[in-house]
């Protein structure tokens, strides 16, 4: 990272950011053209391994790309706020973000799909409710996870008023 003073080093601070944000953008490589899509997500952090969970339709551009090339990157950001200034060139933006890389795996096992969907629901709703999805419901969606190989955090704090 070029701007080391903005790096979020503490893993707990990075996980707080992942907990507080709700949208993740995944970047995929479609032959010669990149493809980015925003998704709601769930997550698991176990033994210092971050896993992100997503769901979507069984068909579509995203699924076609993942089946050809499951390597992906992701970006999550929140706490964005404009920092105003007297001169246009001195405007800035406060933010917190996570960027990482990994591989996407499609979940085929019914129990894994249920678990992944519950992680998404838990993260998005903030509720500990355990949902049971019917096989008929699960046939109509794809649940997949990204096993993250590495991720970094970066932030620019909003300046305190004096």
Image (spheres, rainbow, N blue to C red):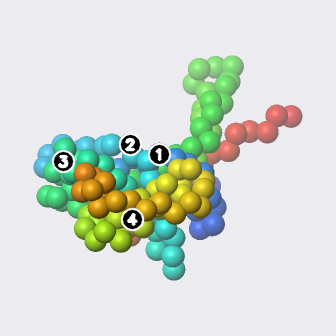
Nearer to me, 8 or 43: 43
Give the quadrant of residue 11: bottom right
Decide if residue 102 is on the left or right side of residue 79: left
> CA gap, disc 2 to disc 4?
22 Å
As displayed, is residue 7 above or below residue 162?
A: below
Q: CA distance from mark 2 to mark 1?
A: 6 Å
Q: Quadrant of residue 108?
A: bottom left
Say which mark, if any, is on residue 38. Answer: 2
Q: Is residue 124 visible?
A: yes
Name the secondary structure under disc 4. Answer: helix
Q: Nearer the viewer, residue 109 or 14?
A: 109
Dot 2 or dot 1, earlier in sequence: 1
Q: Secondary structure at mark 3?
A: loop
Q: Residue at x 46, y 56 (%)?
A: 120
| Residue 74 drawn at (x, y percent) | 39, 53
Of labels 3 and 2, the one closer to you = 3
Q: Residues within 10 Å of mark 2 (few under 14, many from 20)?
A: few
**Residue occupied by mark 1:** 23
Number of other residues with Cα within 10 Å of mark 1, as a class: few under 14, some 14 to 19, many 20 or more = some
Residue at image x 21%, y 51%? Answer: 58
Q: Is 160 on the left or on the right of 43, as rendered?
A: right
Mark 3 vs mark 1: which is more N-terminal?
1
In which quadrant of the rendered image does the C terminus lie? Answer: top right
Task: Indicate which disc residue 114 carries.
Answer: 4
Of callouts 4 and 1, which one flags the residue occurring earlier in the amino acid sequence?
1
The Cα atoms of the two marked residues, 3 and 1, are separated by 21 Å
């Amino acid at each position: 990272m070029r701007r080391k003073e903005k790096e979020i080093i503490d893993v707990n601070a990075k996980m707080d950011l992942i907990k507080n944000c709700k949208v993740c953008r995944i970047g995929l490589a479609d032959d010669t053209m990149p493809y980015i899509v925003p998704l709601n997500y769930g997550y698991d952090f176990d033994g210092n391994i971050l896993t992100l969970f997503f769901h979507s339709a069984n068909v579509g551009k995203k699924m076609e790309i993942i089946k050809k090339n499951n390597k992906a990157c992701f970006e999550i950001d929140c706490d964005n706020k404009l920092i105003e200034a007297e001169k246009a060139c001195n405007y800035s933006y406060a933010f917190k973000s996570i960027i990482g890389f990994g591989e996407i795996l499609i979940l085929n096992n019914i129990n894994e799909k249920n678990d992944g969907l519950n992680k998404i629901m838990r993260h998005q709703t903030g509720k500990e409710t355990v949902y049971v999805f019917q096989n008929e419901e699960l046939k109509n969606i794809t649940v997949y996870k990204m096993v993250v190989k590495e991720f970094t955090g970066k932030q620019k704090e909003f300046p305190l008023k004096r």
